[in-house]
Amino acid sequence: MDTSTRLFRILLFGDTHIGLDFPLNPRIERRRRGDDFLCNFRLALQPALEGQVDAVIHGGDLFDRSRIPDALVEIAFAPLVEAAQAGVPILLVPGDHERGKIPMQVWRSHANLHVFDQPGCITLQKNGLRVCIGGFPYTRKIQGEFSAQIQRTGLMETPADIRVLCMHQSVEGAQVGPVNFTFRYGPDIIRGADLPRGVAAFLSGHIHRCQVLKTDLCSRPLAAPVVYAGSVERTAFAEQHERKGYLLLDFAPTENGGRLVKTRFIPLPARPMTALNVETDGVPPDVLRSRLQASLAALDPDSVVQIRLQDPVSEEAWQVFGAASLRALAPASMNVEVAYRKSDRNGEDQPENLAG
């Protein structure tokens, strides 16, 4: 990096959900989605290991759940510690899946690892710049707490050439899903008008689609951009058409907290996702099995597949959609799950059945 330009580069990523479909002692050997997330997690950190960035911010939901086995904590922190030992500051925001806390154990004392499990800020010195990064953990009903949380960080009172706030929250105007559901108003949504001036950007996790918000829903300019890197892999079928990756963000100093001058999206490999609508009414099990095998064979063998059952399913037909049957019908490289309406079977409430 050309230090004469006096820029500060941040690698932003998040929603890595380590632990999703990642059993430490699996009873059945099959491909696991957890390996996809872990692989992309490591790929996202590569620029830090190569000395291409000045800091790394993880926007939250490092883990998929709040209770994490020690062995999984070690697996997740290994690449973070490697980047930290290479001299790159690593800052993490606890997300809602972690219930506001990230277990760190022995790494809490590492000078280059910092978790915003309480509101606070740290100042970094690089390229002759003072860069202050504030953050706070995921906060429920943030709309009534946002100003107080910022005040608790001390970010706005700290002298700096560049100020950045990192969090794990929904902001007015953020969009998700295939129909572009838009976050508008509610206790868990930050209003655009509440974003303070004096900050170069607000960097956040929680929203799984990469996007940069510059205006509120009334087209009024925000005080600074709100930047979401998105998740590193597709976590649900609502994300099946979204690109996944991480962001490289270049900041320049100003008299009022700096500004974001360049945003670069770096794509990560994302598994193709396909939904198969399967009609079962009146179809003999052997025909159903043959049709399903042909449909699966026609897909990319690397696919994540959801079989959506359209009709009530007989007891005989259910045998086709059992976990062992699906493993036999699909390529070993696929992940296959079955989704059905809760009242489809025997008139009883049924959860979504995951198989394969």
Image (tube, grey):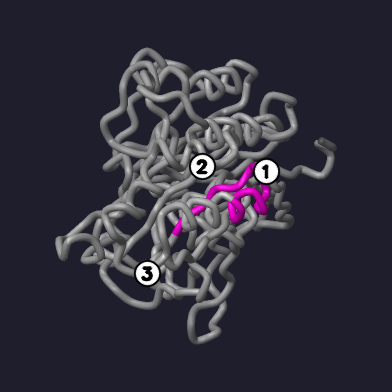
Q: Are marks 2 and 1 in contact (CB under 8 Å)?
A: no
Identify the image quadrant of residue 170: bottom left
Query: Can residue 83 be seen here?
Result: yes
Locate residue 140 relative to residue 236 in the image: left or right: left
Q: Which residue is mark 3?
A: 281
Closer to us: mark 2 or mark 3?
3
Q: Which residue is mark 2?
A: 335
Query: Which of these two is toward me, 275 or 33?
Result: 275
Q: Is residue 306 magenta?
A: yes
Question: Could you tell me residue 196's position as x and y percent?
Answer: 45, 65
Question: Could you tell me residue 323's position as x and y percent?
Answer: 39, 39
Query: What amino acid type should be assigned to the residue bearing mark 1?
Result: Pro
Element type at marker 3?
A: loop
The part of the chain drawn in magenta is 294-307
Label 3 packing within 10 angstroms: few (<14), some (14-19), many (20+): some
Question: Could you tell me residue 293's position as x and y percent?
Answer: 56, 49
Picture disc at residue 269: 1
Name the residue at 48% across, 49% down: 235
Which badge, 1 or 3, is on the more N-terminal residue?
1
Q: Is residue 9 magenta?
A: no
Query: Which of these two is toward me, 172 or 288?
Result: 288
For the C terminus, give its image quadrant. Answer: top left
Label 1 packing within 10 angstroms: few (<14), some (14-19), many (20+): some
Cα distance between the residues tagged 2 and 1: 16 Å
Query: What amino acid type should be assigned to the residue bearing mark 3?
Result: Asp
Tell how many labels.
3
Element type at marker 1?
A: loop
Which badge, 2 or 1, is on the more N-terminal residue?
1
Picture disc at residue 169: none
Determine whether 224 is above or below 74 in the image.
below
